[in-house]
Amino acid sequence: MVGKPLTDIASPDDLRRLPPEQLPLLAAQIRRLLLDTVLSSGGHLGSNLGVVELSIALHRVFDSPRDTLLFDGGHQAYVHKILTGRRLAFAYGLRKEGGLSGYPDRGESEHDVIENSHASTALGYADGIAKARALQGVTDRAVVAVVGDGALTGGMAYEALNNIGAAPQRPVIVVLNDNGFSCAPTAGAIARHLSRLRAGAPASPLGPSVFDRTTVFEQLGLSYLGPVDGHDIPALEAVLRQARALRRPVVVHVTTVKGHGYPPADADAERMHTIGSGTGGAVDPGSPVWSEVFGAELVTIAHRRADVVAITAGAPGPTGLTAFAARFPHRCYDVGAAEQHALASAAGAATAGLHPVVAIYSTFLNRAFDQLLFDVALHRLPVTLVLGGAGITGPDGASHHGLWDLTLLAAVPGIRVAAPRDGTALRELVGEAICCDTGPTALRFPRDAVGPDIPAVERWGSLDVLYRSARRDVLLMGVGPVTAECVSAARQLAEVGVYVTVVDPRWVLPITDVLIGVCLRYRLVVVVEENTVAGAVACALARALTAAGAPIPVRGMGLPHRFLSQCGRSELLDEAGFTAEGIANVVVTARTELVDGRAVTP
């Protein structure tokens, strides 16, 4: 086995048979595989480099899948995949269509128990699994949740700890992977608490009493072991065996270095948290991404308006707030992986006279819908949501596509929703949103680079006309950047005698009287939106037209109403027909149905 332990490991059983003296070489080989693969395919680099030794120790001490291993957030599970028989699939198919997911995937392996990529959820799963085991009389199967310190900034983690700690008869092992980061440095009081524990100082600043030295976990009823060096495999194995032997809820505090073993990731853990495919972590020198355009405009507005503050949920860089945080550090709040709190806190700030701008990914809006609906919208508060990563996000897979925000936002009374088509429109709409003081506003845009501007040929009220035909036949409405393909489709259709006018309503929800008036001039309306087809803009427009006594046929073109797997953004959009040719085909089909007297519905 000397010199090639990794190639001999097809299962955790093989790993447990490996002599301890071979483990440092195995760790080095895994780290090399991570670098070779992720620098080529893209994905989460820093977090996985940091858990190499921890993953080895976990699979040597626990017998997966008999023992249940859960990885919170899922982005730290690459080494787990490699050690559970997926080494070749990882090397050649990570985040590719039909290949290996960048997160745990129940369809890939019996070792992947949950498919989670949103933080703070694994402890809830662990509590439920432990309850089931207790009812079933199963006492010899461990339940282990690997949780990053960033996940402990989310409220769900404490809801679970509250239940886990209250049941000493149900042994859950919480492995706290503490590297001081989520996407960005971990924010809040828990970060300070863990820092004191790492330093060996009292857990409380109140004094040196025994009570003050107890950890927050012990106060909640869990035992506490650590901190232990997360890159020392023998020490890790020893403490994990000790945790299992306690047979009660326990936290094992493991300290790791994000990006360990790769100097660029060590030096810039935030930038190397996740990288694009084929970049080696380098910044793309080409077109700016949508979040950067938003961030620059927000800084400009904030210079004029002292009431503007920004809130992010653990990801200031990816959401475009880096420049704002640098210029206005006392007006930028990172609340951690806590989208619910982000919206509730924004509601409080708005109540006190500020205009909060909450920048989160579209996929994470799902977690804060209750707060948006009842804490913000019910109170008609001036809070602006900025949703990056809307629509297809590509190789991050099902849980990261932003396919539901328009559907959710359409259900919120009083909210105004914009979908900018280009950088100029984004800058205009950010300003208009922040000027709105009568209720909440939202903007949504994709995660990729901003394309060329799409100039309007004229403006009808708040609605931009991007292409105008000589005859009023079909009105084609684009929602967001897809309007570029709508314009191309209209030009193609003009060549075959189909007359199409392309409009961008700019504010897509609620449906305005201006838009209804424009629709009345046409025989057919086709709406193209990068959102699930269920209940979004096309449906809202059809209802509004019916309510206005103008049942103009509306055909909605959206994304499939199912969970989409990982694949390149452009490939998934092409597959869904979001090309000039695909849009033109939908227009022709809907027009033919109209002529034939068949129904045309969203």
Image: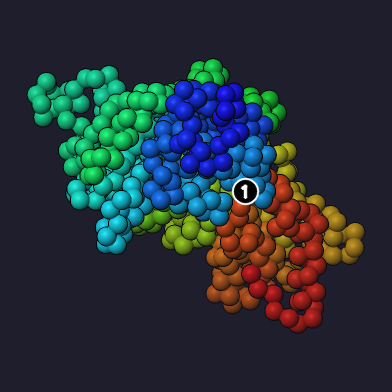
Q: From the top left corner, tell me how far across and down residue 548 is, in percent.
A: 57, 73
Which residue is painted at 50% across and 17% down in the image? 267
In this rendering, is residue 280 above or below 142?
above
Is residue 455 shown to the viewer in this render? yes
Is residue 461 shown to the viewer in this render? no
Which residue is painted at 13% across and 27% down in the image? 212
In this rendering, is residue 399 above or below 151?
below
Q: Residue furthest bottom?
A: 597
Which residue is painted at 64% across and 69% down in the image? 602
Q: From the top left corner, tell me how far across and down residue 216 is, in percent.
A: 21, 35
Q: From the top left corner, tell me how far across and down residue 262 is, in percent.
A: 54, 20
Which residue is painted at 70% across and 64% down in the image? 526
> Residue 103 versus residue 287: which sits nearer the camera?
103
Q: In the figure, is residue 113 to the left or right of 401? A: left
Q: Quadrant of residue 203?
A: top left
**Residue bearing mark 1:** 566
In this rendering, is residue 590 above or below 268?
below
Q: From the top left corner, tell me how far across and down residue 58 is, in percent.
A: 41, 37
Q: In the figure, is residue 398 to the left or right of 126? A: right
Q: Identity of the amino acid at label 1? A: Gln
> Residue 414 versus residue 405: which sits nearer the camera?
405
Dot 1: element: loop
